[in-house]
Amino acid sequence: MTLGITKKIALSIIGIVLVCLVTMVLVTAQNFQQGFIGYLNDVQARQLVDLSGTLSGYYRHHGNFDRLRQNPRAFNRVLNQEGEQVDESRRTRPGRPGRPPPPPPPPPQYGRPPLPPDLESDDDPARPPVSSRTQPESQHALIVGPRLSLIDINDQPVVGPPRVPRSTSSDILVDGRKVGMLVLAPMQKLADATAADFVRAQFLQLFWMASAMLLLSILLAVWLARHLLRPVDAVREATLRIARGELATRVPIGQRDELGALAAHVNAMAQALEHNEQKRRQVLADVAHELRTPLTVMRGEIEALVDGIRALDRTAMLSLHAEALHLNKLVDDLYQLALADAGDLHYKRECLDLVRLTGQVAQRYGGRAEAAGLVLIPAPPCAPLMVLVDADRLTQVLGNLLENSLRYTDAGGRIVLALGRQAGHAVLTIDDSAPGVGEADYPRLFDRLYRTDPARSRVQGGIGLGLSICQSLVVAQGGTIHASGSALGGVRVTLMLPLLEERDAR
């Protein structure tokens, strides 16, 4: 099954969120458990100070810890007895109404002071054993266990395991003298059921919170993927319609981001295709018209000769020959444009002087200008302008430009040529006198089969491919050509070609 971009984006976002949530839950759970264990270790470490005070009183009374040696039950009773006293003092402290005052202590007896029952020897048969089930809960109940050890002055364990690394200790002092220490091994895992239940409840709450966040991220991912790709669907639909030939199709631009730029580019492409298609149809119609006209003339004259309406003489043959030349010129121009568009025109580039070449072409057209009642003024002598071009193609360009000026300039006018340098380029300008063209016509003079006056005859206006061929030949050799208004009242054509020394410098 092929996944669409919407599903891929949604699944990618969901996958990233899932990985982040799982990582967050695991890391948070681990850190919480370790932090909670560390907190309990700190609390129990502070409790060691109270317990060391209890054992200090025990040592002051007995003089040693012999009664507690290897006797965990007696050790636990000592610690829990202190817990009872502490809890009782908390229950009866001032400020709590409704609490009965503690009973008065028993009268003192002579001899050694009485000890609490838990401090008596564990060998006393009159004492019932203290069960762990009947021991009162106290603030010390958390640390009474196998992790707590009583170490004597010789660093030997009295009760509990030997000291382990990273353990917490509290000295037992009697009259400023150290008589032992309490050592608490660090807690590695939660052994208390209440603490374990608390941690488990926190983990469960974290799990449900992560599940809710995952569900919310799934909904947001699906919505976000559809929202982001809605313009892509519009672009896809538009390109499909353009591929079917509906070139007037445009994509609505609803946002100013990369997708909006993509929609704008698709619209520009569609507009260019539509414009090119219109030009193609116009060119085909113009070419068909240009081909049909000489063929119609030739057909009419041949039919007149066949029917005997017109005599087969030199005049008729010259008319047919002129139409055949015109038709051949049209086909040759179309062929050259097709080769230029396909990049198949071959150029034999050579270094030549543009000043010399322009003078030769102007001299060749001087007689025709004089016959047409025009004055052709060649460019004045100047320093050589060396360019690397195809001499035949450039001669063809100059001939087409002068031919165009001779055809459209009114009798009694002038055609002026000028040469110069500008920004590393050789510049050739051809100015002619009236008539000119409108400002809107200058950019279109180089369009194929374009005529400023569509109604004029072919003899006067040609077929409208000369300037298009000039532009293709000049651009192919690294130059530029454009038309503008002339100070003489006609049209100025400016031709620019890179100078040879500038090209070598680059």
Image (cartoon, grey):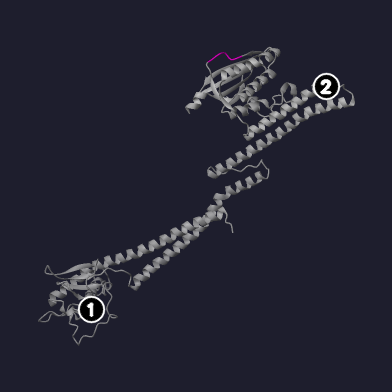
Give the labeled residue for mark 2. Answer: 316
Query: Which residue appears at 61% of the width and 14% of the height?
Result: 378
Observer-side mark, 2 or 1, equals 2
Crowd band around label 1 with a 10 angstrom C-alpha radius: few (<14), some (14–19), many (20+): some
Magenta includes 379?
Answer: yes
Query: Which residue appears at 54% of the width and 53% of the height?
Result: 225
Q: What residue type is labelled 1?
A: Pro
**Res. 66 in view:** yes
Magenta includes 176?
Answer: no
In which quadrant of the rendered view does residue 348 lie?
top right
In terms of depth relative to the viewer, which is nearer, 155 or 2? 2
In terms of depth relative to the viewer, which is nearer, 153 or 288? 288
**Residue 64 percent location from the top left of the image:** 13, 76
Specify the farthest residue to the left.
Answer: 111
Crowd band around label 2 with a 10 angstrom C-alpha radius: few (<14), some (14–19), many (20+): some
Give the labeled residue for mark 1. Answer: 72
Above or below residue 192? Residue 341 is: above
Q: Main secondary structure of the magenta part?
A: loop
Q: Is residue 39 left or right of residue 452?
A: left
Above or below residue 386? Residue 80 is: below
Q: What element carries label 2?
A: helix
**Label 2–label 1 contact, CB within 8 A:** no
Q: Earlier in the sequence, mark 2 or mark 1?
A: 1
